[in-house]
Image: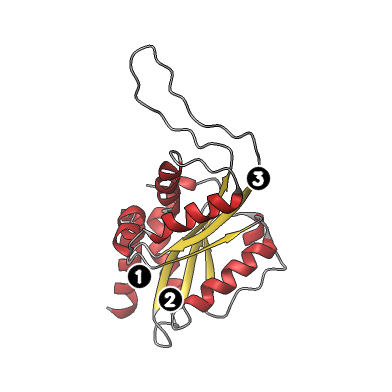
Amino acid sequence: MTQFQTTLATLLTQQWAGRAAISPIKVFAQDETRLGLLPIVRRRITACGVQPTATVLHTFASFYLYGAVEPTTGASFFLELPHLNTEMFQVWVDGFAAAFPESFNILVLDNGAFHKAKALRWPANTVPLFLPPYSPELNPMERLWRDLKDQLADRPATTLDELSDTVCSSIQTYANATLKSLTSFPYFVQAVEAAQKAIYG
């Protein structure tokens, strides 16, 4: 177990302290992923000696899907945006905060420069909690992106609008229970439960 995994409960408790009496606390995993017209390649089973075929469009057009999931409940917020930068993250985090106005929200996220930019203004009901550098394996969102891209691998799109529609339809099919199942990393859920116990007893 990494140091972050063993100390997450303490880090959450520190953020939680003094706020639990004001509003309910939610802990989300957050991340972004790039989606484009270049094909998503996955392994395929074919007859011996037969090469699998796939539709390939040599176009580099893409967009980014920003998202967050609460691994303990499956509550989520997603937004498609054209770029990966501070300005777009500000749009996303403002929308996220507005989607959960009644709670104090802790976002567990990576160390992307745009997540830490001086120009970024965090909403009053949302704070970041950063993962260790270069540790995508600790982010529960990675499992969701993998599942989503597995679905998209068999559904090539010829335009970004078509891909956007496909991604939107796919995201909407995820029930809270499914999102919870995909993102409920044991260390994450246990840390949230330990923080709740430390605060509420």
Q: For the residues marked 2 and 3, what is the alpha-carbon distance in whole angstroms? A: 41 Å
Which residue is farthest right? Answer: 119
* Tag nearer the camera, 3 or 1: 3
Q: Position of residue 194 (x, y in %)?
A: 31, 67
Q: Name the secondary structure under disc 2.
A: helix
Label 1 near label 3: C-beta < 8 Å? no
Residue bearing the label numbered 3: 61
The type of colouring in the image is secondary structure
Which residue is farthest top? Answer: 49
Locate residue 157: give its quadrant: top right
Residue type, numbered disc 3:
Ala
Residue bearing the label numbered 2: 16
Residue type, numbered disc 1:
Ala
Q: Position of residue 68 (x, y in %)?
A: 47, 62
Relative to residue 197, is residue 43 depicted above or below?
above
- The mark nearer the N terminus, 2 or 1, is 2
Give the number of marks.
3
Foreground pick, 68 / 82: 82
Residue bearing the label numbered 1: 195
Q: For the residues marked 2 and 1, what is the alpha-carbon distance in whole angstroms? A: 8 Å
Foreground pick, 158 / 59: 158
